[in-house]
Image (cartoon, rainbow, N blue to C red):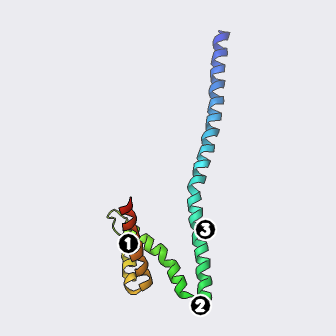
């Protein structure tokens, strides 16, 4: 009987210790996963902030054309990436349509879209 009780207590103690260490390990893994997910978001936010600062500096210095050129790159990149896809969500489709309409009146953005699209075609053909 003593052996049975000692075995049962040892089993419970082993289960408790194993559960404790596994839960701590899972918690650390979850923290690592969350940190890895946030890194690209933080990098994107940093890039937006730096781009915003540079745009304001250019505008304050009277270099509005350079500011327009600077912002034409991400606009053209977004457009060339998503304009041909049919499975986009509504907000993406609306933004693509807005960019297309905007490019009709803004030659800098239109030229950048054209350059970006021709680069994508050339880059795809090389692969």
Mark 3 or mark 1, which has the lower sequence index? 3
Mark 3 or mark 2, which has the lower sequence index? 3
Residue on which the image places disc 3: 46
**Which residue is drawn at the image coordinates 31% and 64% (left, top)?**
86
Residue on which the image places disc 1: 118
- Mark 2 surroundings within 10 Å by alpha-carbon count, few (fewer than 14), some (14 through 19), many (20 or more): few
Residue on which the image places disc 2: 62
Q: Residue furthest top?
A: 1
Residue closer to the observer: 51 or 31: 51
Alpha carbon separation for disc pair 3 and 1: 29 Å
- Mark 1 surroundings within 10 Å by alpha-carbon count, few (fewer than 14), some (14 through 19), many (20 or more): few
Residue closer to the observer: 121 or 29: 121
Instruction: Give the x, y percent position of residue 67.
Output: 54, 83
- Mark 3 surroundings within 10 Å by alpha-carbon count, few (fewer than 14), some (14 through 19), many (20 or more): few
**Which residue is drawn at the image coordinates 60% and 40% (left, top)?**
26
Alpha carbon separation for disc pair 3 and 2: 24 Å
Residue closer to the observer: 2 or 41: 41
Mark 1 or mark 2, which has the lower sequence index? 2
Quadrant position of residue 62: bottom right
Residue 51 in the image: above or below residue 89: below
- Frontmost of labels 3 and 2 is 2
Verify CB contact (< 8 Å) between mark 3 and mark 2: no
| Secondary structure category for the residue under label 1 | helix
Instruction: Give the x, y percent position of residue 49.
Output: 60, 72
- Frontmost of labels 1 and 2 is 1
Alpha carbon separation for disc pair 1 and 2: 31 Å
Instruction: Give the x, y percent position of residue 22.
Output: 61, 35
Instruction: Give the x, y percent position of residue 4.
Output: 63, 12
């Amino acid at each position: 009987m003593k052996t049975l009780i000692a075995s049962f207590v040892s089993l419970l103690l082993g289960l408790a210790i194993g559960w404790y260490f596994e839960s701590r390990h899972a918690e650390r893994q979850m923290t690592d996963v969350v940190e890895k997910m946030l890194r690209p978001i933080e990098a994107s936010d940093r890039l937006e902030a730096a781009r915003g600062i540079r745009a304001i500096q250019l505008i304050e210095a009277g270099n509005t054309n350079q500011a327009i050129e600077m912002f034409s790159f991400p606009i053209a990149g977004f457009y060339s990436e998503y304009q041909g896809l049919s499975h986009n969500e509504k907000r993406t489709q609306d933004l693509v349509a807005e960019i297309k309409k905007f490019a009709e009146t803004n030659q800098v953005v239109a030229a950048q879209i054209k350059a970006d699209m021709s680069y994508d075609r050339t880059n795809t053909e090389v692969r």
